[in-house]
Image (tube, grey):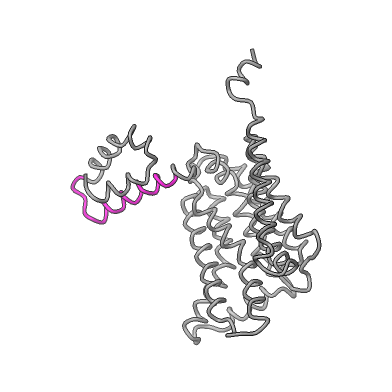
Amino acid sequence: MNVALRTALALYPARYRRDRGAELAEVFADTTAGSGRLATAREALDLAAYGLRLRTGLTDTALPGRLLAAAAPLLTGALLGLAVLPGVGDWREYTLTRAARSGTDLPWGRLVENIAVLGLAVIPLLLVAAAALGAWRAVRLLGTVVALLGAVRIGYAALSLPPSGVWSGWFFAYETTALVPYLLGGLMLAVAPARPADAHGRTDRLLILAGAAAGFAVTRAQGGYDTRNLMDGWWPVALLLLPLLLVLFAARDRLLPAALGLAVLPLTAGFSLFSLWEQLGGVWRAAPWAIGTATALLLGYRLLGSARPTRRQTASLMG
């Protein structure tokens, strides 16, 4: 057994490896027989990726994977609803206009930032087109690009901070949380199981439209990312908790409301995190509230899951 195969199989759960390790090794040997190093490495990466999916529950049979797959059409629409109209008076309008007009005669760092700005305005359109056509592997690839561009912009914001000053941390927190929808949404699309190309075509297109409407409505209701429209009080808490409460429906295997909550969560999290950080006075003061909320949600999920009837109970109830 070569090193690539051993490394890939090490990522599989121990029980799965005991039951099917020999079969996987045999298939790998047959597939890579006579192939070059590049083809062998690609097969090993595919094998390793599936092992990671099994460990994390991101397969199309496990609940986390099924939930992400169900949320994918809504999420592509939600990102379009966020990006389709930067917003009059919104900081994104200024950023996008500046990036489009500046051209390429710029320092390298600013050029990379401008490419990321324009990419995050255009790629959501490509995401929706790919999802509408059922090209879910392309959706996963474009989701990866969206997450990477969001990370690039966060990195640029960190590198371009003033060396000191009261506003330095404020602007970094503001820009970072504003990019949460792209970073988190793109990551969820990147790791979601690929849906079959012919599965639920018309339904998926309707879900994309519903996600776009929800994303646009949430963005407009909050007022975009203009600091004059940031909401205080309990509104940020509500915007953060309502999608999380919808996700709890997954404990009862009701994926549609849970998928809607999961799709809208990156948008509402982007709105809420900065406002809560500002109201509570920093990350450390917000941490106890975050831990308490996460604990309560986890307990609620477990209680709902334990109340769900098993297949045997369901069969007995049906006679």
Task: Examine the structure image and report whether residue 177 is included in the region drawn in magenta.
Answer: no
Q: Nearer the viewer, residue 303 or 232?
A: 303
Q: Position of residue 283 (x, y in %)?
A: 65, 66
Judge from the rendering whether residue 214 lies leftward or rightward of residue 233; answer left or right.
left
Q: Quadrant of the C terminus?
A: top right
Judge from the rendering whether residue 110 lies leftward or rightward of residue 40; answer left or right.
right
Judge from the rendering whether residue 120 lies leftward or rightward of residue 39; answer left or right.
right
Residue found at the far right of this picture: 233
When asked about the image quadrant of residue 302, the answer is top right
Q: Position of residue 292 (x, y in %)?
A: 68, 52
Residue found at the far top of this picture: 319
Residue at image location 57% in from the left, 66% down from the top: 122
Magenta-colored span:
33-53
When asked about the image quadrant of residue 10, the answer is top left
Main secondary structure found in the magenta portion: helix
- Give the number of callouts: 0
Q: Position of residue 308 (x, y in %)?
A: 65, 29
Q: Quadrant of the N terminus?
A: top left
Residue at image location 65% in from the left, 48% down from the top: 295
Q: Position of residue 121 (x, y in %)?
A: 59, 68
